[in-house]
Image (cartoon, rainbow, N blue to C red):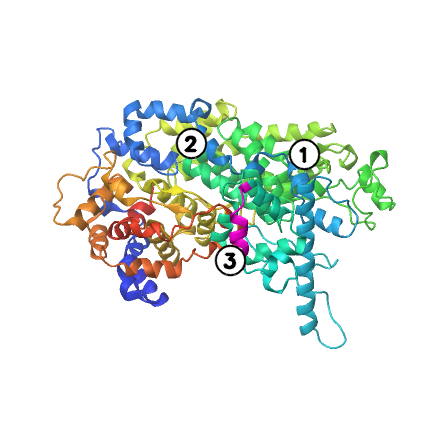
């Protein structure tokens, strides 16, 4: 087929990978896997509804990040409707095991002010470096600050030296890596740029070989080791951090408390550490939470109310509270409460620039025009701006209507956008606490007209009145219902279903649970026509593969990188519309081959920090039973049938099975995949992996290599790609 030719022309070594590529071609060329569905098809009742075990699989594939081993049987035991009601009420579900996992990320539980105080960002570090802000009094925090100052100075010196080498005679622009003010730019979350060698340092510890230094440090008790490292000079710390590789850093932090590990992670860059912890904890929650529907809906709303982690140096500091306090508590609650929470969220105020919006006729604008730059009480309002520079920012007003509530065809005009922006002037961020505040001096006075309705001058209450008007609009009810139906039902959901959900939205005053119940009880959700009709996004694919395989994640950083490699980095959508839930944005031959590569690397235990025991899974009494009616001729066929049941819960098509079995004894498919999806070096460039992960290289050889190849091909199959 054409898709197959595309693959063969685009990848090296295709002779050994052709069959794996052809599995991807099956998905590219088939809108609906009719052939797969015909194998072991579920019994259809007189009403044309999915029934039996297939009904449970369908529900788990839509309302969780994919079934985990034994989960289908557990739902069968308690009943599907009862399971769904439990998921709608997450507080009734014990999630203490997840809480224990999340304890390794202390930073995500801190307030914005606490994060800023403990782990100063690049701006604060520059202030300390320039003497405009005192160093912290706390000894540990002081070391953190001094280390980051030393790192910035070292990087700036390198950049200036490089710029001097390439600068033409007569001078030129500023050094590479600096902004127009000559200030150092912050690195991106997940990136590690320190590469200093310890060989050129006069420091006594650094003068020793790296191996001797490591042996010396690891011989110490964890508390003594931490104290010794923190007592090093800033230059020595920079060089130590840049020289040691992932496995060695794991040895350095062995036995330390989560707070101590986190402190070492922050050496050289708090910004990256916080951003990574926000992403890693999200991966842990989505894979391991027993409150799966809450996790799925949190993911849905994080995407709907999208913020971009690299918007600026502050956004990463705002992500933990955005997920923890703004989105997750309201994910299954009331839409208007959620809308209000996002409008007041520092993350949203920063991302869509409303924190800097000033009414053109406000007190603040008038003072800026006079050049005073002062607000009420004589407090400075940033730097005095030239006349005419202060103004209204319409970003939030536009996206509030277009993306958050009414939709692109919601009937609003540009004049409505401008007036919405005026309504929300004064909604900003308190600089000391980092929390929302309403600043009356920035608020535009006078009445505003939005969608034909007059909003009289009433300070902050104007915004609350407008949010209520938008949250209760029939256009919003339809827009949100349509988007939910696309996520949970099909890319082109039946209009009757969407209308029914929208009616429930309005009747319940935006009760998200009520809307989901309406969808659950609708015949369209259980129609065979929507079975396996959704293609997983990269995030859904990675999480479902890890859950299905029963993998143990010791460090999720490499999984964070994997999702990014597949084209969907967490908090990485730059535009406010968020990622698409439709298959057209994710289905291409190259993208699906990358998914196959990930599946093979995962199954072969080549994802750093993640390990699956295929021997234990195949031997487990709780594992799937080989489907009846199949001839089991040899060991490979037996494993393949068992893995079909374990990983997918149902048989695959004859074409898929034949392709998988033809590669059962060809380990080169994994070698090819690892070449194209190499994460073994993650520890060299990712501090979070480097500190938390385990070296799985030797242990990976203990697994059944044949089972790993079979499992990888099944996880990359068109049947698993769909949900």
Is 277 on the left-hand or right-hand side of 608?
right
Residue at disc 3, secondary structure: helix
Rendered image quadrant of residue 445: top right
Q: Earlier in the sequence, mark 2 or mark 3?
A: 3
Rendered image quadrant of residue 155: bottom right
Is 691 on the left-hand or right-hand side of 413?
left
569 versus 118 height, above or below: below
CB within 8 Å, label 1 to label 2 = no
Q: Quadrant of the N terminus?
A: bottom left
Residue at disc 2, secondary structure: helix
Residue at disc 1, secondary structure: loop
**Image spot of residue 283 (x, y percent):** 46, 41
The crowding category of the residue bearing disc 2, from other C-alpha atoms within 10 Å (few below 14, some 14 to 19, many at least 20), is: many
CB within 8 Å, label 3 to label 1 = no
- Location of mark 3 (residue): 211
Q: Nearer the viewer, residue 670 or 219?
A: 219
Q: Which SS type dominates the magenta stretch?
A: helix
User: For the point 67% across and 53% down, which residue is it?
Assistant: 234
Q: Is residue 286 magenta?
A: no
Is 466 on the left-hand or right-hand side of 387?
left
Q: Nearer the viewer, residue 266 or 226?
A: 226
Q: Earlier in the sequence, mark 1 or mark 2?
A: 2
Q: Nearer the viewer, residue 193 or 208?
A: 208
User: For the point 39% across and 35% down, which residue is it?
Assistant: 64
Q: Which residues are magenta?
A: 210-222
Is 202 on the left-hand or right-hand side of 481?
right
User: For the point 53% across and 29% down, which residue is it?
Assistant: 329
Q: Tag on residue 435?
A: 1
**Image spot of residue 510 (x, y percent):** 51, 26
Q: Is residue 215 magenta?
A: yes
Q: Tag on residue 293?
A: 2
Q: CA distance from mark 2 to mark 3?
A: 48 Å
């Amino acid at each position: 087929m054409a898709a197959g030719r595309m693959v063969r022309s685009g990848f090296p070594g295709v002779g050994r990978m052709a069959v794996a590529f052809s599995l991807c071609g099956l998905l590219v060329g088939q809108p609906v896997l009719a052939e797969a569905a015909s194998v072991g098809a579920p019994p259809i009742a007189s009403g044309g509804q999915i029934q039996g075990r297939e009904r449970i699989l369908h529900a788990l594939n839509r309302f969780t990040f994919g079934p985990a081993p034994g989960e289908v049987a557990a739902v069968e035991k308690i009943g599907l409707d009862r399971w769904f009601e439990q998921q709608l009420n997450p507080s009734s579900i014990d999630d203490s095991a997840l809480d224990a996992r999340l304890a390794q990320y202390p930073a995500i539980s801190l307030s914005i002010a606490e994060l800023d105080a403990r782990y100063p960002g690049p701006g604060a570090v520059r202030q300390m470096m320039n003497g405009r802000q005192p160093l912290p009094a706390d000894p540990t925090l002081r070391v953190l600050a001094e280390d980051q100052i030393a790192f910035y100075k070292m990087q700036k010196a390198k950049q200036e030296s490089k710029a001097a080498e390439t600068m033409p005679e007569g001078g030129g622009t500023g050094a590479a890596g600096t902004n127009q003010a000559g200030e150092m730019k912050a690195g991106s979350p997940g990136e590690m740029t320190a590469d200093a060698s310890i060989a050129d340092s006069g420091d006594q510890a650094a003068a020793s070989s790296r191996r001797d230094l490591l042996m010396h440090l690891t011989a110490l008790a964890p508390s003594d080791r931490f104290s010794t490292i923190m007592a090093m000079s800033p230059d020595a710390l920079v060089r130590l951090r840049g020289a040691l590789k992932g496995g060695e850093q794991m040895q350095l932090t062995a036995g330390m408390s989560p707070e101590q590990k986190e402190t070492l992670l922050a050496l050289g860059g708090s910004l990256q550490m916080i951003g990574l912890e926000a992403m890693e904890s999200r991966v842990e929650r989505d894979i391991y939470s027993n409150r799966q529907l809450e996790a799925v809906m949190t993911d849905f709303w994080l995407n709907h109310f999208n913020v971009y982690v690299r918007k600026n140096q502050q956004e990463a500091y705002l992500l933990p509270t955005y997920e923890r306090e703004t989105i997750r508590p309201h994910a299954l609650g009331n839409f208007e409460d959620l809308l209000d929470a996002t409008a007041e969220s520092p993350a949203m105020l920063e991302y869509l620039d409303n924190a800097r919006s000033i009414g053109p006729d406000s007190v603040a604008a008038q003072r800026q025009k006079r050049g005073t730059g002062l607000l009420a009480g004589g407090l400075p309002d940033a730097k005095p701006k030239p006349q005419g520079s202060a103004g209204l920012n319409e970003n939030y007003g536009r996206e509030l209507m277009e993306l958050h509530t009414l939709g692109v065809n919601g009937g609003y005009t540009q004049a409505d956008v401008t007036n919405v922006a005026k309504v929300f002037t004064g909604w900003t961020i308190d600089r000391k606490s980092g929390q929302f505040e309403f600043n009356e001096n920035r608020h535009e006075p006078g009445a505003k007209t939005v969608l034909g309705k007059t909003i009289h001058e009433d300070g902050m209450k104007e915004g609350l009145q407008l949010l209520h008007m938008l949250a209760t609009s029939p256009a919003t009810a339809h827009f949100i219902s349509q988007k939910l139906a696309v996520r949970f039902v099909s890319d082109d959901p039946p209009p009757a279903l969407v209308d029914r959900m929208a009616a429930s939205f309005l009747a319940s005053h935006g009760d998200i649970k009520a809307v989901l119940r309406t969808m659950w009880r609708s015949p369209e959700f259980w129609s065979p026509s929507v079975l396996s009709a959704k293609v997983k996004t990269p995030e859904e694919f990675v999480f479902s593969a890890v859950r299905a395989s029963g993998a143990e994640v010791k460090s999720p950083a490499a999984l964070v990188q994997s999702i990014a490699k597949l084209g969907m980095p967490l908090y990485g959508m730059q535009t406010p519309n968020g990622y698409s839930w439709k298959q057209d944005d994710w289905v291409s031959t190259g993208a699906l081959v990358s998914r196959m590569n990930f599946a093979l690397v995962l199954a072969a235990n080549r994802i750093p920090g993640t390990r699956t025991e295929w021997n234990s899974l195949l031997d487990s009494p709780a594992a799937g039973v080989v489907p009846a009616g199949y001839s089991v001729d040899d060991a490979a066929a037996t494993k393949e049938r068992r893995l079909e049941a374990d990983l997918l819960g149902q048989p695959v098509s004859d074409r898929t099975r034949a392709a998988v079995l033809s590669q059962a004894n060809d380990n080169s498919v994994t070698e090819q995949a690892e070449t194209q999806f190499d994460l073994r070096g993650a520890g060299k460039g990712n501090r979070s992996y480097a500190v938390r992960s385990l070296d799985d290289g030797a242990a990976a050889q203990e697994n059944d290599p044949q089972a790993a190849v079979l499992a990888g091909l099944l996880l990359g199959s068109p049947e698993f790609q769909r949900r």
